[in-house]
Amino acid sequence: MTEDLDARLRRLQASEDPDALIDLGCDLADAGRQTDAERCFRRASDLGDTVASFNLGNALAAQQRWEEAVDAYEVALAGGEPDAWRNLGKVLEDLGDLAGAMRAYRGAADAGDLEGGLQLAFLLREQGERHAAMEVAMEIAAMGDQEATAVVACWRWCATLDVSLEPDLRAGADFFPAARADLAHLLRVTGRKDEARFVLERGAKLGEAVAWLPLGNFYADEMEDDEAAEEAYRGGIAAGEAYCHHNLAVLLAERGDFDGAVEQFRLGAAAGDQLAADALRELERG
């Protein structure tokens, strides 16, 4: 395969055929050869192909050359390539230009890219604009996006703990992992603990990071099974759920493993968990 790609690259490096260059660039990108892919996309872009400009932006973003990626996406947009809006938003977010990212995600939504529009809702919520975030999510949901519908159900549950949201959370569980975790919470508070456990264990088996923390809490609080809880918290950490560090640390401290607890609090604090940071300060003061 590598030999075939190299032969095609040698043959097409001076090509005037944008489609052939784009096809080769995509194959090179799939093979992880972003620099060579960039060469193909750049040549096709120079020939006036806006899809090539979009792909050039992707190749540059993959190399973390964010400012150059922005330029490439803007060329693509100027040439009428609407798919560039969402990726432009992601790059601007990485650059810290949140206002620009919001404009780009709004452009995606206006162009019919519902996933891009949902990214606008998530970004608004991260900035504390919960009402605006809900309005955008509801707008996207009204267009028929099932993930957005699940997001709306989750956010309503978090705000109200309204048990009448159960059908919406059930319907959204396969589209937005937090909906499954929230469904388990609802089941637990309404006394259906066995089903809550089943729902969380299914989420964990599906690789949903948000399932591990409540699953560990369930094992610890409802079953008093510290070994299973520890395994769940460690599974969550491996899946990228940083908040599991705090709960694992508490579990270790209760067991008398203070060195292990301090290590977990430090890891949680480093990952941005304020609870872990506060607990670490208390330990250090003591």
Image (cartoon, rainbow, N blue to C red):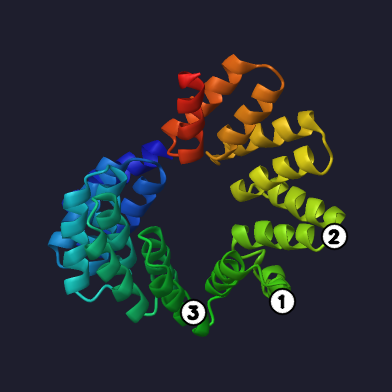
Question: For mark 3, what is the residue?
Answer: 138
| Picture coordinates of residue 34, whole percent (x, y) | 30, 43
Secondary element under disc 1, as helix, strand or loop, is: helix
Secondary element under disc 3, as helix, strand or loop, is: helix
Disc 3 versus disc 1: nearer the observer: 1
| Picture coordinates of residue 92, whole percent (x, y) | 25, 57
Please state which amino acid type lies under the numbered disc 3.
Answer: Met
- Whether residue 108 is visible: yes
Are circles 3 and 1 on residues that touch, CB within 8 Å?
A: no
Q: Which mark is residue 192?
A: 2
In the figure, residue 243 lies in which quadrant?
Answer: top right
Q: Residue at x 46, y 74 (%)?
A: 134
Q: Which mark is residue 284?
A: none
Nearer the N terminus, badge 3 or badge 2? 3
Please state which amino acid type lies under the numbered disc 1.
Answer: Ser
- Whether residue 15 is visible: no
Of 28 and 61, nearer the camera is 61
